[in-house]
Image (cartoon, rainbow, N blue to C red):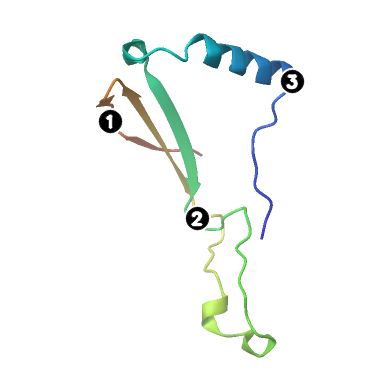
């Protein structure tokens, strides 16, 4: 197993988020006036995070124990999308180099 990762939050940031949540806990239709967006980045090959496998010592050179990789990296792709009040924006796919 590997350890999970999460953003580091300061005590002040935690209190600000909690205050915002308490101020808006009774909102229903008001959230439809906001646009929410997010983006994600994916590595195609040569992932920076290691891939863990389980194998017997006697099976060290079996083909299913290898992860393919290419020289110069396999590239990465990024995606972005927004939503608002039940409406969804287009999924935007772009390359980052």
- The residue carrying mark 1 is 90
Q: Is residue 89 above or below residue 59?
A: above
Q: Quadrant of the N terminus?
A: bottom right
- Residue at the image position 41 percent from the left and 25 percent from the top: 37
C-alpha distance separating marks 2 and 1 = 26 Å
Q: Is residue 64 above or below residue 43?
A: below
Camera-nearest residue between 26 and 92: 26
Most extreme residue toward the front is 26
The image quarter in which residue 84 lies: top left
In this rendering, position of residue 22 left or right of residue 94: right
Q: Residues within 10 Å of mark 3 (few under 14, many from 20)?
A: few
Query: Which callout, 3 or 2, points at the residue further toward the start of the chain?
Result: 3
Q: Choose mark 2 or mark 1, whichever is in front.
A: 1
The image quarter in which residue 16 lies: top right
Q: Position of residue 50 (x, y in %)?
A: 63, 59
Q: Position of residue 31 (x, y in %)?
A: 36, 15
As helix, strand or loop, the secondary structure at mark 3 comes to helix
Query: Which callout, 1 or 3, points at the residue further toward the start of the chain?
Result: 3
The image quarter in which residue 77 lies: top left
Most extreme residue toward the right is 11
| Cβ atoms at labels 1 and 3 below 8 Å apart | no
As helix, strand or loop, the secondary structure at mark 2 comes to loop
Q: Choose mark 1 or mark 3, whichever is in front.
A: 3
- Residue at the image position 69 percent from the left and 86 percent from the top: 57
Q: Residues within 10 Å of mark 2 (few under 14, many from 20)?
A: few
C-alpha distance separating marks 3 and 2 = 39 Å
C-alpha distance separating marks 1 and 3 = 36 Å
- The residue carrying mark 2 is 74
- The residue carrying mark 3 is 11
């Amino acid at each position: 197993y590997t350890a999970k990762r999460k953003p580091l939050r300061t005590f002040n940031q935690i209190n600000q988020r909690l205050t915002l949540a308490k101020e808006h806990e009774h909102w229903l239709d008001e959230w439809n006036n906001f646009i929410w967006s997010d983006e994600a980045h994916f590595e195609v090959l040569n992932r920076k995070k290691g891939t863990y496998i389980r194998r017997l010592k006697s099976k060290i050179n079996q083909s299913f124990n290898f992860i393919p990789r290419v020289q110069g990296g396999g590239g990465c792709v990024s995606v972005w999308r927004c939503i608002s009040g039940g409406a969804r924006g287009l999924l935007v796919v772009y390359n980052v180099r």
